[in-house]
Image (cartoon, grey):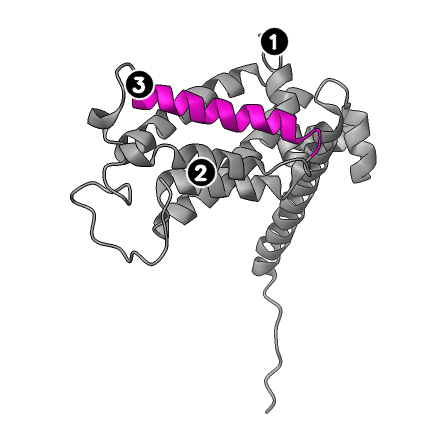
Amino acid sequence: MRKISTFDASDAPFRAGTATKARGEARRREILDTAMSLFAEGGFNTVSLADIANDVGITQAGILHYFPNKAALLVAVLQEREARNIATREHLEADGVPPLEAYVRTLEENDATPELVRLFVILSAESTAPGHAGHEWFMERNDALMDGMTERVRATIDERKLPPGITPAVITRWLLALAHGLGAQWVLDPSAFDRAGHVRQFLELLEPYLRDPFGRDDTTPDRPTAEKDYP
């Protein structure tokens, strides 16, 4: 006797819920990507929720279903950009790329999408105003970035070799200021110079102060010397 297949109704809500969640995630992603692009073009203060909704093809109420207000959407955009950078940097470091070189390669990846660099330049400038929606986020990010990069510099540089008054924290401020300042110039004409390349040249100046020619401490296992590592 041929077995008659049956439909398990108890499984239907699960499948329906999974599909609904997937559609919701896709819509949220579309809103984020659209907001990221529009903010990069015009800045946070110029772009409205109506502009974003129109580009996505939904109502403003549809956006507010995912983000309670425009400020929350901005913070989500900034968090998304930062998460991508952190993931890139951590992946490179896990593959054995020296920490500061991983930072430069992350800049290179960012520079492949100038609109994202423009977004950061515009929003970081706008957010200097205490009342700006991104002000607190940028304050927290700058503190975290400063702390993390200082540890990377400290792990790379032999402080005993540095001139008096120069510390890993000072070098970190130079490095971050250089990357951010060059970014503000670069977005005006991305063809004018290589931002990441200029930052790498700065790191090459630090070579006399490395812990050893590969930026390792005494406990780091030997690595092949076929190609040059930057700090």
Specify the label residue 166 is tagged with. Answer: 3
> Gap in Å between the C-alphas at discs 1 and 2?
28 Å
- Dot 3 surroundings within 10 Å: few (below 14), some, or many (20 or more)? few
Instruction: Assign the C terminus to one quadrant of the image.
Output: top left
The amino acid type of the residue labelled 1 equals Ala
Name the spot of residue 41 as percent of width and height, x first: 75, 29
Determine whether, in the image, residue 190 is placed left or right of residue 176.
right
* Residue that appears at 36% across and 29% down: 148
- Dot 1 surroundings within 10 Å: few (below 14), some, or many (20 or more)? few
Label whose residue precedes the other's in the sequence (1 or 3): 1
Q: Is residue 137 above or below residue 218?
A: above
Q: Is residue 188 above or below residue 163?
A: below
Q: Which residue is mark 2?
A: 103
Asked whether residue 69 appears in the rendered view, the answer is no
Specify the label residue 229 is tagged with. Answer: none
Name the spot of residue 47 as percent of width and height, x first: 77, 23
> Gap in Å between the C-alphas at discs 1 and 3?
31 Å
Secondary structure character of the magenta stretch overall: helix
Q: Which residue is mark 1?
A: 129
Where on the picture, by quarter, is residue 9? bottom right
* Residue that appears at 44% across and 27% down: 175
* Residue that appears at 56% across and 15% down: 135
Name the spot of residue 152 as percent of width and height, x first: 33, 33
Label whose residue precedes the other's in the sequence (1 or 2): 2
* Residue that appears at 50% across and 41% down: 106
Magenta highlight on residue 208:
no
